[in-house]
């Protein structure tokens, strides 16, 4: 049985005081309102990871995630944080390959493969992001393009390793634009990725893989998007910064 997951990507938002307020509100609402079978995650700025970890402590279905990690274990990489360091602070999840990292920090498929390896080697669950640009969507090549992103960064893993990865499909044209993939467009891609995973790892691994939708998913459209049989939750941008909206999304299955 695959997990239902709603992960909030705070990106580079919130001051320390605001982060504490938001995390505390989310924690209270998860405890009182979110079904136990929905895993809620807050991907906070690195600075707040340990503080927010304390806020979520003891709530089984609430966890923190880093938004990135470096592929090397340690060394002269000013400003970076390694998976070894995240693991040493008991951070259970890390986003890898968000389109903003691919675009603004030129992260390649090969580098992302190394980051996935580093996360898994340290017992951290990677939430691997993939998605196509508007140009690729309009050109009609988008299904193959996104499947190729999985092949390039994940398909070197053993089936046992792959089973620990969460996928987040985020069409770039729907990130921060207010545009959302329709429920049909999300389901089409998710089903395609599941078939692609099954061809490599078999039906049972594919069936158990959580594939989240991201890209302007909000309290109004989450229910329709999550209704897709291959949509197992969401990676939420702006709406994760408002506790009530984020929790409405977490209750949208
Ligand atoms: C968005 O919805 O804007 C996101 O990028 C979520 O990661």
Image: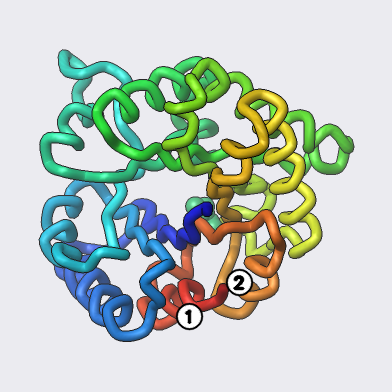
| Label 1 SS | helix
Q: In percent of the image, x 26 and y 45: which residue is there?
A: 92
Label 1 CB-ligand 1 distance < 8 A:
no
Q: Determine if residue 6 is in view.
A: yes
Residues 50 and 134: in front is 50
- How far across and down, in percent of the image, does residue 178 sit? 64, 65
Q: Which residue is mark 1?
A: 248
Left/right of residue 93 with respect to residue 253 in the rendered view: left
- How far across and down, in percent of the image, does residue 65 sit? 31, 49
Q: Determine if residue 100 is in view.
A: no
Q: CA distance from mark 2 to mark 1?
A: 9 Å
Q: In percent of the image, x 48 and y 56: which residue is there?
A: 3
Left/right of residue 72 with respect to residue 139 in the rendered view: left
**Do tag 2 and tag 1 residues touch (Cβ < 8 Å)?**
yes
Q: Residues within 10 Å of mark 1 (few under 14, many from 20)?
A: some
| Label 2 SS | helix
Q: In percent of the image, x 38 and y 21: which residue is there?
A: 117
Q: Residues within 10 Å of mark 2 (few under 14, many from 20)?
A: many
Q: Is residue 5 above or below residue 195?
A: below
Q: In percent of the image, x 49 and y 40: which residue is there?
A: 98
Residues 197 and 99: in front is 197
- How far across and down, in percent of the image, does residue 11 sit? 38, 52
Left/right of residue 81 with respect to residue 161 in the rendered view: left
Q: Which residue is mark 2?
A: 222
The picture quadrant where one finds residue 118 is top left
Q: Is residue 1 above or below residue 147?
A: below
- How far across and down, in percent of the image, does residue 131 sit? 65, 40
Which sits earlier in the primary sequence, circle 2 or circle 1? 2
Q: Is residue 103 above or below residue 95?
A: above
């Amino acid at each position: 049985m695959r997990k239902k997951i709603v992960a909030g990507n705070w990106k580079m938002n919130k001051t320390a005081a605001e982060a504490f307020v938001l995390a505390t509100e989310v924690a209270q609402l998860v405890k009182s309102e979110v079904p136990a079978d929905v895993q809620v995650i807050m991907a906070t700025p690195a600075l707040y990871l340990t503080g927010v970890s304390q806020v979520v402590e003891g709530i089984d279905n609430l966890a923190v995630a880093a938004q990135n990690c470096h592929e090397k274990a340690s060394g002269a990489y000013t400003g970076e944080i390694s998976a070894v360091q995240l693991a040493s602070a008991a951070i259970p999840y890390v986003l890898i390959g968000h389109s903003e990292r691919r675009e603004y920090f030129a992260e390649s498929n090969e580098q992302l493969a190394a980051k996935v390896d580093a996360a898994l080697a340290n017992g951290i669950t990677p939430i691997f992001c993939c998605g196509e640009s508007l140009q690729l969507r309009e050109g009609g090549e988008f299904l193959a393009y996104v499947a190729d992103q999985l092949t390039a960064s994940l398909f070197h893993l053993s089936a046992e390793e792959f089973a620990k990865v969460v996928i987040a499909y985020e069409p770039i044209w729907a990130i921060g634009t207010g545009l959302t993939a329709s429920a049909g467009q999300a389901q089409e891609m998710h089903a395609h990725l599941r078939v692609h995973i099954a061809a490599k790892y078999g039906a049972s691994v594919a069936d158990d893989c959580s594939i989240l939708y991201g890209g302007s998913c909000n309290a109004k459209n989450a229910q329709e998007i999550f209704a897709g049989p291959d949509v197992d939750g969401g990676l939420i941008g702006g709406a994760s910064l408002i506790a009530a909206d984020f929790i409405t999304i977490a209750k949208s299955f």
